[in-house]
Image (cartoon, coloured by chain):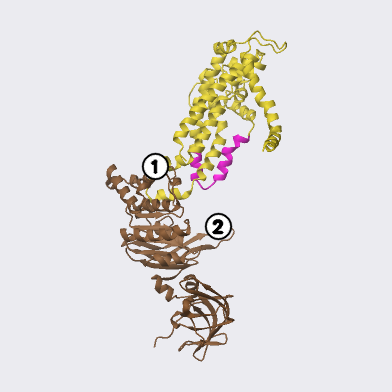
Chain colours: A brown, B yellow
Amino acid sequence: MKVVLDHLTKRFPNRNRKIKTEVVAVDDFTFEIPDGKLVGLLGPSGCGKSTTLNLICGLEKPTSGRIYFGDDDVTNLPPELRGVGMVFQNYALYPHLTVLENILFPLENLKGDKRLSKEAMRSRALEAAHLVQIDALLERRPAQMSGGQQQRVAIARALVKMPRVLLLDEPLSNLDARLRLQTREEIRRIQRETGITTVFVTHDQEEAMSISDVIVVMEKGVLQQIGKPQSVYDDPTNLFVAKFLGTPPIDVFNGEIRGGLLYLGKDAVLPVAGYREGKVTVGIRPEGFVPDEKGPLCCRLVGVEVMGRDTSVVAAHPALTTNTMRAIVDTDSGVDPNALEVRFSLKSRKVCLFDAETGARLYAPTV
Amino acid sequence: MKQNNLKGWLYLLPAIAFLGLFMVYPLVDVLVYSFEEGYNFASQTDMGTGLYNYSYVLHDPYFMQAVKNTFILVIITVPLSTGFALVISLALSSIKKLRDAFQTIYFLPYVTNTLAVGLVFMVLFKRTDYTEGMVNLLINWFGGESVDFIDGPYWAKMFVMCFYTIWVVLPFKILILTSALASVNPDYYKVAQVDATPRWRVFTRITLPMISPMLFYLIITGFIGAFKAYSDEVALFGTNLNAAGMNTIVGYVYDMLYGDSGGYPSYAAAAALILFAIVLTITVINLLVSNRRVKI
């Protein structure tokens, strides 16, 4: 089921009653979630991603704008009539019911034509349990299971009534690091097998990048960028998106364009044709640095960290906006850990220019 | 190790001394009294040991009346007050406006003196030379006959008794249940809403199980409290409860000790132990039931 958000806005009254201003949690969102895709809503805490999810779910009513599932306008429908499945951050499994009873719960609510026979309910529940691989735990209670297992039960409970859209609120944040890796693969697999349009919320960019078909980056209620993870990473529309995606994060410099050359401090690092002259903010991905004895970018070497697969070079440069930068280079690139200086040349593909004032991306003129 | 043990006991000594002196010793003494026949306070003498005290108490029509009153009180007030408290708490937690105001109003009886409340009930129910009492005026208004609630028929007095007891115990139960309801994670209700759960089912399958530990706590303490009823009766019907036919077991024990016909510690002790046996039995049954039902 395709999900379309059309100029969706949600304002909350300020919690402090003395202040009459409203908080804009979601500001004029318009985007389309294609049918059968896994979409990650990504942003820092308080950016309105959970509110967006609640709006899609129907737990919150939008201040203005419309929501469509396929061609149905569901803006004014309560959640129970939208046909959504929701998994909460804390799973919200009923603690006094067994796993099987928890999964059966939504089916037992169905009325009229949709009501299934006892056997049909049971077989549907078993099917859902099998899908998330908890067949052996059906008689357990939530307290007797690990976080990852509870997560699976919650997904099974959301899937059992065959929702049109599956919503997951911070599905991995309550799990430890190892389980998180495992569970995100699991979510990907379940989504592929069922083909249900799935939206999940996360503040962890790695999580969003690794499993989403499409990521939606938000900040302060404003949509920043939508796209395939790789294209958002390679081609961020502004400095916020560039900084938010990627580990280690992008290295940011204060630069200047003079005479068709990009200067970082005193170093003229790249020829840049056609841009307006003046100050710019420069973002360079850590993998965009190539150690090169004759390279134009001259940095003070702070340290070399061998990661095994590649090497992380920590260095300092006067034009940096942070104290140090990090470059990821090949292990055999021969950076001497005892040297005082290290020189880099840059891969131009990994360099992004941003407006020094607004942070908006500056694009090379297409000639 | 041994020295450590000694130290531990030393620390416990003050508490043990106090509890021993004021709790354990009297309890044991009550047991002893209850088996000493014809014990005399003044001369500190008895006429032998045996079960006569129990036999006397169990054959005393006043005691049987007290047992009957107490049981009626317990059976009527505990379920009703818990039920009312649940309904009121549910209503309180479902409103937003004026919730604090209502909560305060419902809690007021808790901080009001029992005797003051008794006085208010007098105004409501007691017939005086000048007025029939408010409730009777209401009954007359609807064309009914006046009823003497304080000195009249048994059922009328029992009605006032139960009404009063329920009213007095409600605030505490409402307080406990509203906080129990508030502590249920709202996500459960959101999930239930997304899953299109009917309201009644939300209540029976989610809310009730979630607050069941508190509910059972209230039922158990409610039973124990109602079995120990006494001061409320005095506030309503005066000190001569036997004459009013509204005595309770604790009232009977008190009368046997200090009442006009008192001075019989042995009978009082026997009656107290019978009450203890009853409360113990009911509580054990309660716990057995709740262990099977309360699953959280």
Residue type at numbered disc 1: Arg
Which element carries disc 2, helix, strand or loop?
Answer: loop
Task: Name the residue at 45% across, 55% down.
Answer: A89
Which element carries disc 1, helix, strand or loop?
Answer: helix
Task: Check residue B96 for magenta coloring.
Answer: yes
Rendered position, A289 above or below A34: below
Instruction: Give the chain letter at badge 1.
Output: B
Front residue of B164 and B280:
B280
Residue ID for mark 1: B201
Front residue of A205 and A108:
A205
Q: Nearer the viewer, mark 2 or mark 1?
A: 1
Quadrant occupied by the N terminus of chain A: bottom left
Whether discs 2 and 1 lie on one chain: the answer is no
Task: Name the residue at 70% across, 32% down.
Answer: B13
Q: For the residue carrying disc 2, how many other residues have a C-alpha within 10 Å: few (<14), some (14-19), or many (20+)?
A: few
Measuring from the top left, give residue A341's x and y in whole percent. Answer: 57, 82
Instruction: Farthest residue to the top: give it.
Output: B47
Q: Magenta region, mostly helix, strand or loop?
A: helix
Measuring from the top left, give residue A74's x and y in whole percent. Answer: 35, 58
Front residue of B191 and B107:
B191
Rendered position, B52 above or below B7: above
**Magenta region:** B87-111
Measuring from the top left, give residue B259's x and y in whole percent. Answer: 66, 16
Instruction: Give the chain letter at badge 2.
Output: A
Is residue B159 in view from this perspective?
A: no
Residue type at numbered disc 2: Arg
Quadrant occupied by the C terminus of chain A: bottom left
Q: Are the residues tagged 2 and 1 within 8 Å (C-beta)?
A: no
Residue ID for mark 2: A15
Is residue A43 in view from this perspective?
A: yes
